[in-house]
Image (cartoon, rainbow, N blue to C red):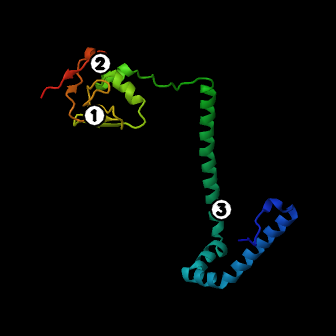
Amino acid sequence: MKHLIIDKPQWQSTRQRVLFRSLTALFWVVWIYLWLPILTFSAWLLGVKTGYDEMVVHEGFLALARLVRLYVSTIALLGGALLAWAYYNYIRFRGVERRKAFPRVTVFELSRRYGIAPRMLEQWSYAQRLVVYHDTHGRVTWADTGDSSSYAPGCKWAQPGCASRACPYQIPTGSDDVRRGELTPATP
């Protein structure tokens, strides 16, 4: 379908743009002028005549001007104070980097914290998808990577039968055993 309106203002000359914008503004004024009778009637219903009397006849706009001047000066004072504070801190801390990165956590620290064999944590770090299940105390009870090497806590690397939740092994709680990655049979 061919569009009849070409909307490419960058192809217009400056004179054309000024002319079209002026015509648009003129027709908006005409459009508003056509609505004046309805606007006047609505204003009369809402009591705008009273507002006109207060602001123009009784010179209420002078009080409004004083109030606006007070508001503007207050805003300027507060804004200036914030800018002064920001500049002070900029001068004070220029060239000083106080933010520091958190120290890196090693696999051993994670394995000791969560009671998981370090080899399992390394395997999980390369998984594209990992679902970790917890018991009521927040300890890891099961991890599913979506492949054949799903892991129940304490299972050796991709040991057959460990892809089910009924793994016959558990991770010991002693830090030396976890460091070595040794497993103990689960007690029924």
Q: Which x, y percent locates residue 89?
A: 59, 31
Q: Pick the quarter of the image with the N terminus.
A: bottom right
Q: Name which residue lies at 61% across and 74% down.
A: 54
Q: CA distance from mark 1 to mark 3?
A: 78 Å
Question: Which element carries disc 1, helix, strand or loop?
Answer: loop
Q: Pick the quarter of the image with the C terminus.
A: top left
Q: CA distance from mark 2 to mark 1?
A: 18 Å
Q: Which x, y percent locates residue 96?
A: 59, 23
Mark 1 or 3, nearer chain start: 3
Q: Is residue 124 above or below residue 59?
A: above
Answer whether labels 3 and 2 touch (C-beta < 8 Å).
no
Q: Residues within 10 Å of mark 2 (few under 14, many from 20)?
A: many
Mark 2 or 1, nearer chain start: 1
Q: Is residue 21 above or below residue 150?
A: below
Mark 2 residue type: Gly
Q: Is residue 8 left or right of residue 115?
A: right
Mark 1 residue type: Ala
Q: Is residue 11 above or below residue 170?
A: below
Q: Name which residue lies at 43% across and 36% down.
A: 128
Task: Looking at the picture, tell me which residue is in the foreground, 143 or 5.
Answer: 143
Foreground mark, 3 or 2, reads: 2
**Which of the numbered marks, if any, corresponds to residue 181?**
2
Foreground mark, 1 or 3, reads: 1
Would you name the residue on which mark 1 appears? 163
Q: Name which residue lies at 84% across and 63% down.
A: 12
Q: Which x, y percent locates residue 28?
A: 72, 74
Q: Residues within 10 Å of mark 3 (few under 14, many from 20)?
A: few
Query: How many discs mark residues in the rendered view?
Result: 3
Q: Name which residue lies at 41% across and 33% down.
A: 127
Would you name the residue on which mark 3 appears? 65
